[in-house]
Amino acid sequence: MEEESAPNNEKKAKRGGHDGFISSGDELEPEQPMDVSDAVELVIVDPGALDVDFNHGRIAKIENLEGLTQVENLCLRQNLITKIEGLSTLTTLVDLDLYDNQLTKIENLDSLVNLTSLDLSFNRLTKIENLDSLVNLKKLFLIHNKLTKIENVDHLVNLEMLELGSNRIRVIENISNLTNLTSLFIGKNKITKLKGVETLVNLRTLSMQTNRIVKLEGLDTLVNLDELYLADNGIEKIEGLDKNTKLTTLDLANNRISQIENLQHLVELQEFWFNDNKVSSWKEIDSLTLLKKLETVYLERNPIYYDASNPLKADASYRRKIKLALPEIKQIDATMAQSMVG
């Protein structure tokens, strides 16, 4: 995997979905069969435990858990498990973590009616299914599988966070009933249109980096949106944000935008990530002077970032020009602005 620059890594940490992972990440899936010759048997030491953690234990099969009568949190992440089974007696479970295993199907979860958090990220799932009984779920993580369609989740009306990053989804669909969602992550998929979120009026975070979106639209009803991440798409114009006046973070990095416009009403904006676009005139920065709460700007690798006489070299006065235009700014790209004064 290609190594990322420091600024991107910093942003990745802030954008995080679950445990700091970003839905638009570039992690590679291990396709080769794993060696289970030294797999270990699952053994329960304390039947009365509330929290059971078998993280990275080389466990190949979920078994021998019948004695757990009070368990609320079960962690089986980073093992060799190929099938969801052996959980039917664990009706007290609230949190089930099966992140990074070898699962190919969602199944045998019907009795876990008290689950509020389910993590099936980094597996080999091709279909969202068999979640009918899990109506109390508040968090569902399906990052980095092989999903092609959003389906069979519209009944999960208590969901507050849905993570679908790094799959093969082409359309946002079948989530109109999920009006309690506050966070939706669908980065690194194949989505071409920003639509299908109109009913999600309680959304505070929407992350759709690394898709195929070319137009900013469909956000009028998301009046509570606080963070919007649309880096690494094909967007050419800043528009369609008239109703999103509560935004504090706007990420439009690595698109095809040449003008900084239609932002003056975003008076709560604190972070503006706009690196790797096509801004060639310093006059565009004037649009940011009206945003009195703005603290952080990312503008590197726009045309204004480079020396006019040498387009391969950064302009030595780039940061000074930004600081002069935006004297109250606290961070320019990955560097604190205070350290650049002088």
Image: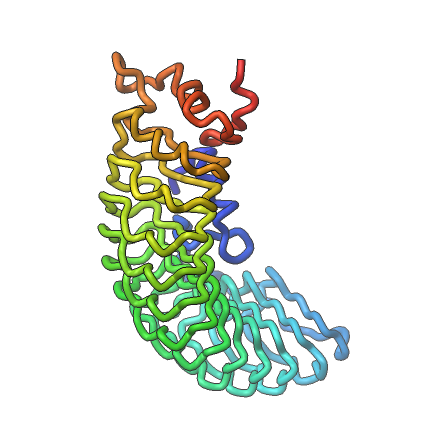
Which residue: 46% across, 54% down?
A: 226
Q: Nearer the viewer, residue 192 or 266?
A: 266
Query: Left or right: where does residue 150 sit relative to residue 100?
Result: left
Residue 331: horizontal and vertical position, in percent? 50, 31
Residue 138: horizontal and vertical position, in percent? 53, 72
Residue 193: horizontal and vertical position, in percent? 24, 59
Residue 315: horizontal and vertical position, in percent? 35, 17
Query: Left or right: where does residue 255 sit relative to residue 142?
Result: left
Q: Please say if 142 is above or below 279.
A: below
Q: Please say if 337 is above or below 159.
A: above
Quadrant showing the N terminus: top left
Residue 120 seen in the figure:
no
Residue 57 seen in the figure:
yes
Q: Please say if 126 is above or below 298.
A: below
User: Which quadrant holds residue 163?
Assistant: bottom left
Q: Nearer the viewer, residue 122 or 287?
A: 287
Which residue: 44% across, 44% down?
A: 267
Query: Left or right: where does residue 46 sit relative to residue 91?
Result: right
Which residue: 35% across, 74% down?
A: 176
User: Which quadrant holds residue 103?
Assistant: bottom left
Q: Nearer the viewer, residue 161 or 325?
A: 325
